[in-house]
Amino acid sequence: MDTKTPKTPSTPVVMLLLWLTGLYLRLTVLIAPPLAPRIARNLDLGQAATGALTTLPILMLAVAGLAASWLISRIGARRTLITALLLVVISSSARGLGDAPMLFVATAVMGIAIAGIQPALPTLLTEWWPSRIAMGTAIYMNGMLIGEVIGSTLTLPVMLPLANGDWRLALLYWSLPALIPALSIRLLSPVSRAFENDTGHWLPDWRRPLVWKLGILLGASGSIFFGINAYMGSVLGGRGEEALLPVALVMFNTTQIAASIIMFTVGRSWIGHPRPLMVLMIVGLSGLSGFIWLSGWPALVALMPTGLAVGLLLILIVALPPLYTRGNATAALAAGMFAVGAITNFFVPLLGGLAGDMLGSPRFAVIPILIYGLLALPLARQLPTRSGLSHE
């Protein structure tokens, strides 16, 4: 019997696999908003149903993450990742195959598939590239952020014309390339049993404060990001600055890609240390305050350090489970963190909207986000430090 440890993929192959897979963490979700008006007209959807095309997959990330952790403990992270990518292809394509019920069922299944990718990637990272956790995380997060950008910006000017204006074909054309990372992982990475027999670690230890600290911090970063995107138009409209909305969206969201590029150089020295997390959180909250209380171009300029800060926070926090744990324990910790973070990302901006309605001004919609961020800030100091870990 061969007892040799399977060879890990070479560094260029690891980088390729991580980046290609990262693309499909968000790409198929973010192609829905540009196509939403056409889908709504064709299927006679209301506003709430149209919005659910984007929010339903995000909500499923919280619901299905724990099931993904269980699956990893049974068949391994590699097989889980391949299965999840294939399910993305099938479910995302199926959104265009039928009527409205089929659309929403397929959308929910797609969210479940993406929930399988999220904990599988950091788990495999502990095996493929354990000495470069920060770099590996930055690579697949860069893929995710670029997937967001190309999905949201190229669907209408590029993909829809290729599909002859048919939104159903556009969904299919964006979905099929997810076969590329699935087949690449199948062909270029070896089967590993290093962690697949560790079936005892799949459910997050909810009694462990670390799960909640990571989830709350991840939720604080995400609430700032999603809250700004959700209420930017309302805030600018309330000040009579609707014309600034397109440039504001570009200025804010492109900083996410810049953050992932910066992490290629600073990630190794920042990951696992509380001070960068605290400074970035303060920068993000300060910039958000500036956007609310300033006006015109100064308000837009305040958004840029905010976007950069929350992008860096996202990558630094996502990189922590594979730094703290190994194997299936990483999947369990990551699943718990993503579940708490996703629920927070859904409810805190929603609470902000309610506050804005009650107080009669869109700018008050960010008050719950600011309060939540300030409450989460001290948790960064309580995380385990890199110097206190027994492995890196």
Image: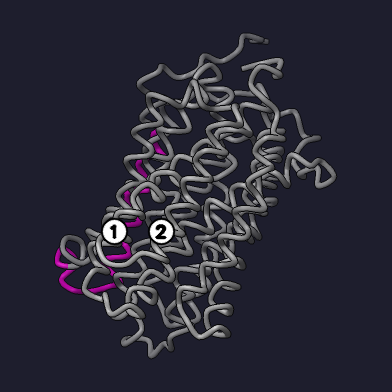
Label 1 Cα neighbours within 10 Å, binned few <14 / some 14-19 / many ≥20: few
Count of numbered circles in the view: 2
Residue displayed at 55% across by 33% down: 319
Disc number at residue 298? 1
Residue displayed at 81% across by 42% down: 205
Tell whether 168 sits left or right of 362.
left
Looking at the rendering, the stretch of residues picked out in magenta corresponds to: 161-184
Residue type, numbered disc 2: Gly
Disc number at residue 290? 2
Task: Looking at the picture, tell me which residue is in the foreground, 167 or 235.
Answer: 235
Q: Residue furthest right?
A: 207
In this picture, is 28 found above or below 144? below
Residue type, numbered disc 1: Pro
The image quadrant that residue 43 belongs to is bottom left
Residue displayed at 46% across by 59% down: 289
Task: Looking at the picture, tell me which residue is in the foreground, 341 or 328.
Answer: 341
Mark positioned earlier in the residue sequence (1 or 2): 2
Residue displayed at 43% across by 37% down: 140
In this picture, is 100 found above or below 257? below
Tell whether 238 sits left or right of 79.
left
Q: Residue furthest front?
A: 294
